[in-house]
Image (cartoon, grey):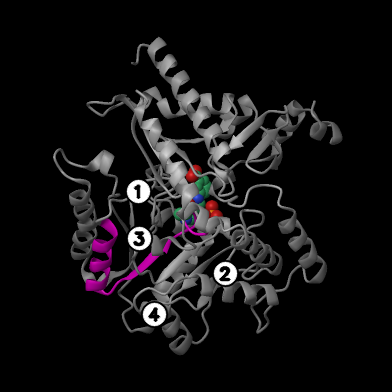
Amino acid sequence: MNAFADKQHLSTREIQALDSAHFLHPFTDFKDLASRGARIITHAQGIYVWDSEGEKMLDAMSGLWCVNVGYARQELADAAYRQMMTLPFYNSFFQTTNLPAVQLAARLAALAPPVGERSFAHVFYSSSGSESNDSNVRMVRRYWDLLGQPERKVIIGRLNAYHGSTMAGASLGGMSGMHAQGDLPIPNIAHIGQPYFFENGLPGETADEFGLRAAGWLEEKILALGPDRVAAFIAEPVQGAGGVIIAPDSYWPEIQRIVDKYGILLISDEVICAFGRVGHWFAYEKFGYQPDLVTFAKAVTSGYIPLGGVMVGNRVAKVLIEQGGEFTHGYTYSGHPVACAVALANLDIMEREQLVQRVKGELGAYLARRFGELSDHPLVGLAETCGFMAGLVLVKNKATRARFHPDAAVGMLCRGHCFNNGLIMRAVGDRMIIAPPLVMTTAEIDEMIRLIRLALNLTQQDLKQKGQL
Ligand code: PXG
């Protein structure tokens, strides 16, 4: 028994039994988890987490893509405490507001760079990425209604995209497993293919040729639906949950050309990519496109407390404000004072420690170099980074790029070796991905790369033993 379990007078097994008796986990096969027992994470510090058996693990996933400033930052706890003692809650529905929510909105507006004719002076708050994308659907439809084009309802997303787990979020996303449950997608959502060159590039096609072709699917879909019916296109700058899918350079400029040509709104879902993850406060800046709405959540508070929202660009804000009357949408916790106070303290840390600049500069380059070196491993078909997110593809044969059969569950095999050796890394099919805290040192990056290589070697050994290599 470790100190935590001791203090609670509960052993690991007792907590696991309570867990499976009462707690239905997200995205989980409940029966399967009950048969194994969940790992109990007890505490965390910096880039490490510990479990109830005392195992220390390097968290290369920043919790769930969110703990950008690392764990156990006293300042964030202090900010929450101070705000709770001053004003733990008040709503912003009935002509009231609170200082942290106002200050945060103004600060986010200042951090979101204007692009072309788009600027971002306004924020609509929620408590999560999913809720924020539901807000996007409501705002987009309201916008077109107010402009006298109510038939513009269809929002186009991409296959293998993740936009959350509510009815609208799961519908906008393109995860087939999610659509298979509960009659999704909801009406008036359509999907196009993802810009995944490694998987979908044709023989002889360059990455940029593929990028143009993949962007072209948007125009084809708009024309098939009828341009007058299309309200918006939503996409992640880099697909996160889909496996860190980084589009070729040619992709975003062509997407911009297409949305401009048909006058449809562009939604940049930056729940993962904002707040330094790709070396910018907001990722649309890196890729040079001009969104009308920007979804954020997760790292706005480094995950210390739930907060999300939408940066509402001037094109939409002007119509909603000047022509809209009451917008009948919002959440109890829209502009929650404690969440906003923690976000402000989180931005203070990020600015003081220059985390965004570190990722854009030397530290990002160091990770790119060290992660890139993994491509010399016999199992690795491709290893690529974008700021502080990275992915590699496990392949059976480097030369032919032959992939493993999905039944081999090669990603899960590798993930098992990561966990057994003190590294939290995620598997998405045969892609192994990381999104480590932005506070890592070069020595910690070296340790992470060493652990990834160890897991790759053990996976290779296993596959050889099973006759799959
Ligand atoms: N948009 C994007 C781009 C996301 O990555 C959401 C919306 C939804 O956010 P909330 O806060 O409602 O969860 C996300 C969330 C994974 C994984 O397995 C990724 C997310 C959530 C859970 C698991 O990579 N991203």
**Residue contact between numbered discs 1 and 4, judged by CB atoms under 8 Å:** no
Return the residue nearer the eye: 346 or 432. 346
Q: Nearer the viewer, mark 1 or mark 2?
A: 1
Mark 1 closeness class: few <14, some 14–19, many ≥20 residues within 10 Å: many
Residue bearing mark 2: 125
Residue bearing mark 3: 287
Residue bearing mark 4: 315
**Residue contact between numbered discs 1 and 2, judged by CB atoms under 8 Å:** no
What span is colored magenta in the figure? 251-275
**Residue contact between numbered discs 4 and 2, judged by CB atoms under 8 Å:** no
Residue bearing mark 1: 246
**Amino acid identity at mark 1:** Ile
Q: Nearer the viewer, mark 1 or mark 4?
A: 1
Outermost residue toward the bottom in this view: 322
Residue 359 % position (x, y): 49, 52
Q: Earlier in the sequence, mark 3 or mark 1?
A: 1
Q: Is residue 279 left or right of residue 350?
A: left
Q: Secondary structure at mark 3?
A: helix
